[in-house]
């Protein structure tokens, strides 16, 4: 029997821990505030932003909302981010992606102060991660590490294969697994004989954005499979990058979609927000 890795339950556990911690910090006069910026009205972004604000309210983190029109110029957005950088009341800044095509996302990410970069996307945060310095971790990969640890799955010495090399998931995932002493391979669209590489994985992490792409042919018997994908299937139901029904019987543990990786991203964003008010003495 394969173990179903329950992201809904684990993310709730983390949020409850953070809620207690935030209350303790508040009693000592420390209060976190997250500024959430959305440009335009992309429906998926609106749902994500709403859920992030709801999570803040649950944990006891203040949130400030900036809902800007689609026509907002890059200069206007840069000016807002600089204002938030300078605002002592604001501890964390999140600019929801994607931004409209006329705005340079990289420039906006670089404008956010690394000390308030709760998404962990700033090059300084990325650099700190790779050299093992403390800094904000990219939320989805950090959530995957928590899923593995809290499900009792050891990473040290394991063959870890990542499918996908995005800046948001694949690359930071490699750094985090390396930090946990995994042996890490990153595959991508130009990888030759992908099945042969994924077939070596003890832990297989899939973030390619292609519906049910990974079938049992890609998976070693007894592997742990983590599915970062999120799609709407032909039957109208949500599904991932992994063909769950086909792959699950061959795994020792697997994440479902929905209810696997998805809920962890917001939980780890909340952890980064609480991190902004942890004193040196509380830093893990
Ligand atoms: N869009 C999709 N995922 C994310 C995320 O984790 N952070 C931000 N800022 N935008 C996103």
Image: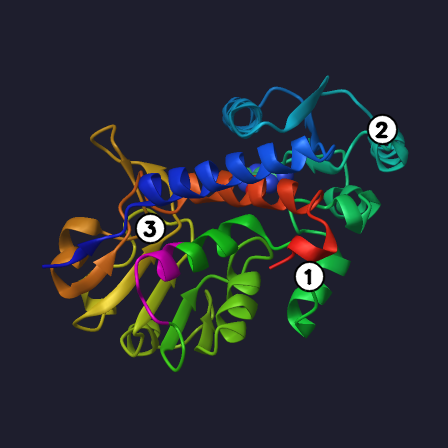
Answer above or below: position of 173 versus 119.
below
| Residue 150 highlighted magenta (yes or no) | yes
Instruction: Note whether residue 207 is visible.
Output: no
| Helix, strand or loop status at disc 2 | helix
**In the rendered structure, which disc, 3 or 2, sits on the residue that comes first in sequence?**
2
| Left-right relation of 252 to 46 | left
- Quickly name the residue at label 3: 241
Q: Position of residue 59 (x, y in %)?
A: 54, 30
Name which residue lies at 83% across and 44% down: 111
| Left-right relation of 213 to 86 | left
User: Which mark is in front, 1 or 3?
Assistant: 1
**In the rendered structure, which disc, 1 or 2, sits on the residue that comes first in sequence?**
2
Residue 260 numbered tag:
none
User: Which mark is in front, 3 or 2?
Assistant: 2
- Quickly name the residue at label 1: 126
Q: Position of residue 46 (x, y in %)?
A: 55, 22
Viewer-side residue, 262 vs 90: 90
Per the rendered image, the range of residues in magenta is 147-154
Answer above or below: position of 273 versus 237.
below
| Left-right relation of 145 to 138 | left
**Figure quadrant of residue 159:** bottom left
| Left-right relation of 113 to 27 | right
| Residue 199 highlighted magenta (yes or no) | no
- Quickly name the residue at label 2: 80
- What is the spatial separation of the Cα atoms under label 3 and label 2, in whole angstroms? 36 Å
Ligand 1 sits in which quadrant? top right
Name which residue lies at 67% across and 24% down: 63
Q: Position of residue 2 (x, y in %)?
A: 15, 58
Viewer-side residue, 2 vs 193: 2
Answer above or below: position of 180 versus 68.
below
């Amino acid at each position: 029997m394969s173990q179903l890795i329950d992201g809904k339950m684990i993310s709730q556990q983390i949020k409850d821990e953070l809620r207690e911690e935030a209350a303790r910090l508040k009693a000592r006069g420390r209060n976190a505030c997250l500024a959430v910026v959305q440009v335009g009205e992309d429906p998926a972004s609106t749902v994500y932003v709403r859920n992030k604000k709801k999570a803040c309210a649950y944990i006891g983190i203040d949130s400030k909302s900036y809902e800007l029109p689609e026509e907002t110029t890059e200069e206007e957005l840069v000016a807002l981010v600089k204002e938030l950088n300078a605002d002592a009341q604001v501890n964390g800044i999140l600019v929801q992606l994607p931004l409209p095509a006329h705005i340079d996302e990289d420039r906006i990410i670089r404008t956010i102060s690394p000390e308030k970069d709760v998404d962990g996307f700033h090059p300084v945060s990325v650099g700190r991660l790779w050299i093992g310095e403390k800094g904000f971790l990219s939320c989805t990969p950090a959530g995957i590490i928590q899923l593995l640890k809290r499900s009792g799955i050891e990473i040290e010495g394991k063959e870890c294969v990542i499918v996908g090399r995005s800046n948001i998931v694949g690359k930071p995932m490699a750094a985090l697994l390396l930090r946990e002493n995994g042996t890490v391979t990153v595959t991508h669209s130009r990888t030759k004989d992908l099945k042969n590489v994924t077939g070596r994985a003890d832990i297989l992490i899939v973030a390619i954005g292609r519906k049910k792409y990974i079938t049992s042919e890609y998976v070693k018997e007894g592997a742990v499979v983590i599915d970062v994908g999120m799609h709407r299937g032909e039957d109208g139901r949500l599904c991932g990058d992994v063909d769950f029904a086909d792959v699950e019987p061959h795994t020792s543990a697997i994440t479902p979609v929905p209810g696997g990786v998805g809920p962890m991203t917001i939980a780890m964003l909340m952890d980064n927000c609480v991190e902004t008010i942890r004193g040196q003495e509380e830093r893990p």
